[in-house]
Image (cartoon, rainbow, N blue to C red):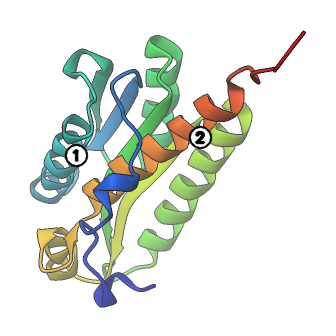
Amino acid sequence: MASALQNLSQYDASTVPDASEIIFGIVVAEWNAHITHALYEGCYETLLKHGARPENIHTVQVPGSFELPAGARIVHGQKNPDAVICLGCVIKGETNHNEYINQAVAHGLVNLSLATGKAFIFGVLTTDTEQQALDRAGGKHGNKGVEAAIAAIRMAALKRDLSAPKKKIGF
């Protein structure tokens, strides 16, 4: 569903798994910092709200959204998190640069997810205007950072739950 039709910060909190034992990486693009830092605030606060411990949240900044996959790979290699959340903002300009950046970031994060078996969350705003980005970074459409945090919690919990040994009855 298009984000214009929903608030990105609305979800059923009762369905979100406990995040107290999950280790997170967060990679934040510095480009459009007034927007990406708002995404980070929403993300970080949501992780804490669902039990994540501050010492289990490892945050780094990279120059721009194009560098998110490389930053995510570095965080994964150094901190071995259960999920990595990538936050950025690419606003369409006079050229098609946004299409190339958005596709490169999406492909990079998918490749990391497939190679590692862990969730690399695409928390990148891909808007036509700065106002659309502001509306999705704590404005009238909520905060995509919240949505990214919830996706990371759910995916890390899914892997944990499916990896747990099956309980047997009897012998």
- Where is residue 24 shown, x and y percent of the image? 38, 29
Q: Residue at x 24, y 66 (%)?
A: 9
| Residue at x 24%, y 15% (from the top left corner) | 55
Disc 1: CA contacts within 10 A as few (<14), some (14-19) or many (>=20): many
On screen, 138 above or below 43? Answer: below
Amino acid at dot 2 = Leu
Mark carried by residue 46: 1
Q: Residue furthest right?
A: 171
- Towards the viewer: 103 or 95: 103
Is 46 positioned to the left or the right of 79 in the image? left
Quarter holding the N terminus?
bottom left
Q: Quadrant of the C terminus?
A: top right
As drawn, 162 above or below 151: above
Q: Where is residue 74 drawn, in percent x and y?
A: 47, 22
* Whether residue 154 is situated above or below residue 146 in the rendered picture: above
Q: Residue at x 48, y 34 (%)?
A: 83
Q: Earlier in the sequence, mark 1 or mark 2?
A: 1
Do labels 1 and 2 touch, CB within 8 Å? no
Left or right of 165 in this view: 109: left
Q: Nearer the viewer, mark 1 or mark 2?
A: 2
Q: Secondary structure at mark 1?
A: helix
> Residue 104 at x, y = what percent?
56, 56
Amino acid on which the number 1 mark rests in the picture: Thr
Question: Disc 1 to disc 2, how far (Cα)?
Answer: 18 Å
Quarter of the figure with residue 119: top right
User: Residue 113: image x %, image y %?
Assistant: 64, 40
Between 59 and 89, the residue placed more toward the observer is 59
Q: Residues within 10 Å of mark 2 (few under 14, many from 20)?
A: few
What's the mark number on residue 158? 2
